[in-house]
Amino acid sequence: LAKSPFLIVSVNEAWTRTTKYTQMEVEGKELSILNGSRANTDTTVRPGKPLHKFEEVARGRCACSTNIHYDKEGREFTDFMTSYPLTNANNAVTHLLHVFKELPVLLSPQHEFP
């Protein structure tokens, strides 16, 4: 069953293109491998925004958030991530599926991070 720590099992080609990490480099590691100096490590503290706790996804609730992450080379990027619970035949959550899309670069330095 899915429980903390939530370790990476598999990534796809789009993920490796965006993050510059290979499957072998991230397998068995936590998604926090993408965190850096400006990464929003606690996406639950976002007034007016939905919570994104992996523990809640493991309980069967989808979640989403906008995040600052860093690729292997230290390049900062912003992404929108949605997490889904995956269940077995007994309806028990066994894995979490994270789908993220890199967002366009913010054009204005005055733009407030979502």
Image (tube, grey):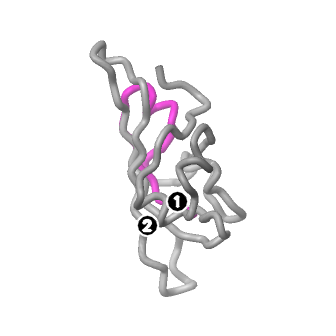
- Residue position for label 2: 102
Look at 51% across and 54% down and name the residue there. 47
Q: Which residues are magenta?
A: 50-68
Figure check: 13 above or below 58: below
Q: Position of residue 33 (x, y in %)?
A: 64, 51
Decide if residue 45 is on the left or right side of residue 63.
Answer: right
Look at 63% across and 60% down and name the residue there. 39
Which image quadrant is residue 63 in? Answer: top left
Furthest residue in direction front, as rendered = 24
Q: Position of residue 11 (x, y in %)?
A: 46, 48
Look at 50% across and 38% down and name the residue there. 9
- CA distance for labels 1 and 2: 9 Å
Between 16 and 2, the one nearer to me in the picture: 16
Magenta stretch: residue 51 in it? yes
Look at 48% across and 86% down and name the residue there. 107
* Crowding at mark 1 (Cα within 10 Å: few <14, some 14-19, many 20+): many
